[in-house]
Amino acid sequence: MDVLMEGFSNTLTFNTILFIFLGVISGIAIGVLPGLTATMGVALLLPITFGMEPLPGILLLIGVYFGAVYGGTITAILINTPGTPASAATALDGYPMTQKGEARKALTIATLSTSIGGIISVIVLILLAPQLANFALQFSAPETFALALFGITIISSLTGKSFAKGIVAGLVGLLIATIGLDPIGGTQRFTFGSMNLNNGVNLIPVMIGLFAAAEAFRSVEKLFSKDKIEVAIKKTKLKWSEFKSLITTILRSAGIGTFVGMIPGSGADITAFIAYNEAKRFSKDKSKFGKGEMKGIAAPEAANSSLTGGAMIPMLTLGIPGDAVTAVLLGALIVQGLQPGPMLFEQDGVLVYGLFIGMLIANLLILILGIYGTRFFTKVLLIPKAILVPVIIMLCAVGSYSLGNNYFDVIVMLVFGIIGYFMIKNDFPASPLILGLILGPIMESNFRRALVMSQGDFSIFITRPITAVLLIFAFITLFSPLIIKLIKKKYRKI
Amino acid sequence: MFNLKKKGSVLLMMMLMIVLSACNGEGNEEGTANGENQGTDFPNKEIELIVPTAAGGGTDMVARQLVDIAQDDLDESIGVMNVEGGSGSVGMTQAANANPDGYTATMVIAELAMYEHLGTSPLTPEDFKPVALINYDPAALTVPADAPYDTVGEFIEYAKEHPGEVSVGNAGPGSIWHVAAANLENAADIELNHVPHEGAAPAVTALAGNHIDAVTVSPAEVRTQLDAGSVKVLAVMSDERHDLIPDVPTLSEEGIDAESIGTWRGITVPSETPDEIVEILEETFVSAAKEEEFIDFMNKNGLGVQVKGSEEFGEFMEENRAMFGEIIPEMGLE
């Protein structure tokens, strides 16, 4: 406990809090812009921290990380443009709420869920990090495959108006995911000789195209329609009773986020979708999802922010980065002369607890900035469409380009913008396609890697307990509606 | 109604065109510099260093640190631009086709000598003029700390008793670390089970979790696990021992006659760049790489500093290219 108190007093200095604040603010700005990801934000600010003290330096980066995950949500809710893949699930119910005039309420829910989820995961990190660390190591190819398969079953709850169209979109996503070098054999697939396609189609320009560009193209059409739909901004605030109804969802999602965060190789995007799916599964009235259900915002937001704490667990305790951002953070720690791994807590305990306290402060700052910023953020909706739409299209292009300074990504964005436009017109939902594209490569490479590890023996999927449990979950999710229907039919006959 | 729709789609097309042309502009700006005073007063404006991998990665960090020091020397700023895609081939192709005026340099990576053998890109070292080699890190055969073998000899013996069963994680099919494991197979006449991962870090994670039997990645990449005591390094695949793990023998010290395999990073310029400009850049980057500040940074990150000038670096790349040409076709890829 002494180290905790000492870490506490080290962090509560004006200097350190100022840097966390700067980090969170720049993180939010980075998250808002499509194409600028949390990883990129952290990587860009990394060299600045080399000359700083370890605590403020690393907390600046952590502030950027947390801020960026939150920032992506703001645009997802307001203009249906997830700033980062982590917020793709939030757009599902966030944007419909904005269309109903409840943008402020939606942003308030998102802010509360983000900071509560984040705080919960940091508390888990403080209390249980070393104990949980070894659990993360149990995850290897077969386990990750089972988790991804479980994730794929979520497509059925993202289908929107037509079940069949949702499944088609999901399959198209999986199909696109096969483009590029075969992850195990190294054969080129559907690359048409283009080296740009060797590593597959980049997820982020696809997402920008399907969500932001497609929506912008559709708005262009509306500019000329006579029945102008002005989005009102109602002043309705989140009621205490409404918040109370969200608490279980937030807690459940925070648990999911922290857990998935620990697993190396899975990201905030998957977590948000899993939490969304679970919120829907536990909800009594499933029909509201996709039409502006508050739980549909709370769940992915609590999950993607609690993932940040979860991802720190293997990074700090084992020196294993769970995702791209923590990989960069790991580099930052090493440059500061720290050695992440089992000894870190013993050798630099004060610093580690200082980091934890700083993470709590970062989440509180998001809460404050988010609540006070809501009024300011929603002003975006007052911008006339004729000005906003071209700006969004420009941002889509700039964002896709800045991703890797590769012109090809801009073309991918435009192609998927056009595809997305026709998908909207014909009621094909975009989220299953995104989910297929995210999970396809994870599923395929881990399935095949598992078989390489077992030298072709399929029993590897049954004999490993975590894999078996996850696979059973996946099958239950997949077939339970069918089985329940059959049972109900039987009972009726009796 | 039809009319309105049509108007909408015309506007949509216009926007597409604006976006496309705005992006095209990016490629043209370099054209103006061509032919201007190539010679004594180089450099007189900012130099761009293309890094063919993501911001925040190992190659990017090395590039930025090096540039920080080099630009003080040069009295002109050097900007880093990350161009990602195709395991580095997108950025390096763009760099090879840049104006050969010295204002576009590239941080090339070991993959440059591998593409033609893998069939993933026609790019070869010949598309560039070498400036300087900066870094070299050999493959290190690393196994769990509790593995039943303590030397390469014992490892090989075990692999001979269990042909095809010892699983070795690498950073992806056809990656340099895959080639490293294949090289060990050839040299020791053993059969290993290659397990490709999405990069070196996931492979090391799998090793730490005891899901695979070994990895052949760089010492820096196994360093945190090494310090934690969860893994041990049996040998490095180079002529000399590595500074990070001076106690670990090389393969040849252990009596195994294998090629040296490692990843490397160096500076190049397009192949048509005039020699006098290459000389200026060579001097700058070679001295920057020898600065204490840079060496400190590399040591902190467990990366090996190996500096070679233009000519030596060129020979080095050609040797690598020839060696990969022998190993890769036998690996059963594609």
Image: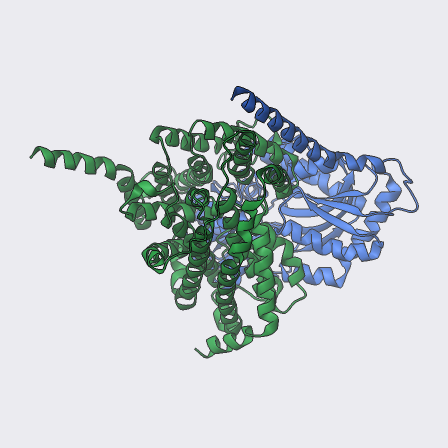
In front: B298, or B82? B82
Left or right: A89 as drawn, with respect to A163? right
Q: Position of residue B292 (x, y in %)?
A: 75, 63
In the displayed structure, A363 sits above or below A174; it is below
In the displayed structure, B195 sits above or below B19; it is below
**What hue does chain B carry in this figure?**
blue
Q: Position of residue B11 (x, y in %)?
A: 62, 27
Q: Position of residue A222 (x, y in %)?
A: 53, 31
Residue at 38% in and 29% down: A165
Q: How is the image coloured?
A: by chain
Residue at 32% in and 48% down: A464
Whether residue A340 is visible to the viewer of this picture, yes or no, is yes
In the displayed structure, A245 sits above or below A184; it is below
In front: A305, or B109? A305
Residue at 53% in and 29% down: A225
Location of residue A135 by image quarter? bottom left
- Count how many numbered circles sit on residues in the image: 0
Please state, as top left, top right, bottom left or bottom right, where the C terminus of chain B lies in the image: top right
Q: Which chain comes out green in the rendered image?
A: A
Q: Residue furthest left?
A: A494
In front: B258, or A219? A219
Location of residue B249 by image quarter? bottom right
Q: Residue furthest top?
A: B2
Location of residue A188 by image quarter? top right
Q: Residue furthest bottom?
A: A2
Q: Position of residue A385 (x, y in %)?
A: 57, 38
Left or right: B59 as drawn, with respect to B128? left
Residue at 69% in and 63% down: B296
Whether residue B140 is visible to the viewer of this picture, yes or no, is no
